[in-house]
Image: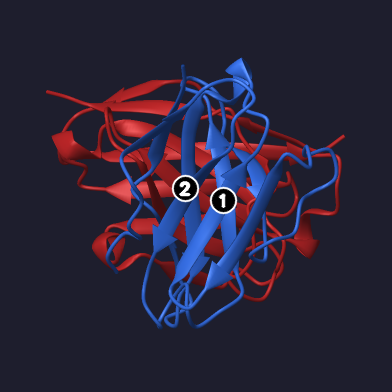
Amino acid sequence: QVQLVQSGAAVTKPGASLRVSCKTSGYTFTNYGFSWVRQAPGQGLQWVGWISAYNGNTNYALSFQGRVTMTTDTSTNTAYLELRSPRADDTAVYYCARAPSPAAAVGPADYWGQGTLVTVSS
Amino acid sequence: QSALTQPASVSGSPGQSITISCTGTSSDVGGYNFVSWYQHHPGKAPKLLIYDVYKRPSGVSNRFSASKSGNTASLTISGLQADDEADYYCSSYTGSSTLVFGGGTKLTVL
């Protein structure tokens, strides 16, 4: 069965870098993409960006451009999210979610990771 | 990209039906048939309920239905059950190859 298993909760200092991993199994990794979505405390879901597991193409939400990098490792079927210079308001649960198209950020997120709580605090 | 507009909360009694609206623009909801709806119980991963405006994934109850008219999409839940109490989010593909979520609607089953 399809599984997305994310890395554990993390605490990071403002200005450092945060990285979340999402290891997958149960399907052909390169036939899909990934969306990353976050939920800050008391807030709604916010789309961070998308990456193709086929060719590594990315699309990032405007508010994250310049600060976020998404990558994939086809040897381990794992997706990664890196956010540079995080601020306190980047404290959130970060989710990876499988996206149906390896070509564009279109389409629904049909399987989700369990979420990773990232706390940005000095 | 501004978030799609959803009512902050809706409520209904068991057995009743409720509808949640999701209003965007011609650059997102109105421009593409790529609207999805998610159910999110706090502390759990969101669950896909509807995709491509009205399609239900395998395993999702037919009590959940959806539609779109112009720049507004709607999710209807019929035969409300206690377990339907959750947050509901719409999302849409946009003209700039990105996705946008609605602000979320908290459903209370009275």
Q: Secondary structure at mark 1?
A: strand
Q: Amino acid at mark 1?
A: Leu
Between B24 and A58, which is closer to the camera in this rendering?
B24
The chain carrying label 1 is: B
Q: Secondary structure at mark 2?
A: strand
The chain carrying label 2 is: B
Q: Is residue B69 above or below residue A50?
A: below
Q: Position of residue A49 (x, y in %)?
A: 45, 60
Dot 1 crowding, Cα within 10 Å, few <14, some 14–19, many 20+: many
Count of number-bearing discs: 2
Q: Which residue is mark 1?
A: B75
**Which tint was used for chain B?**
blue
Q: Residue at x 64, y 25 (%)?
A: B15
Q: Which residue is mark 2?
A: B20
**Which tint was used for chain A?**
red
Which quadrant holds the N terminus of chain A? Answer: top right
Q: Is residue A64 left or right of residue B35?
A: left
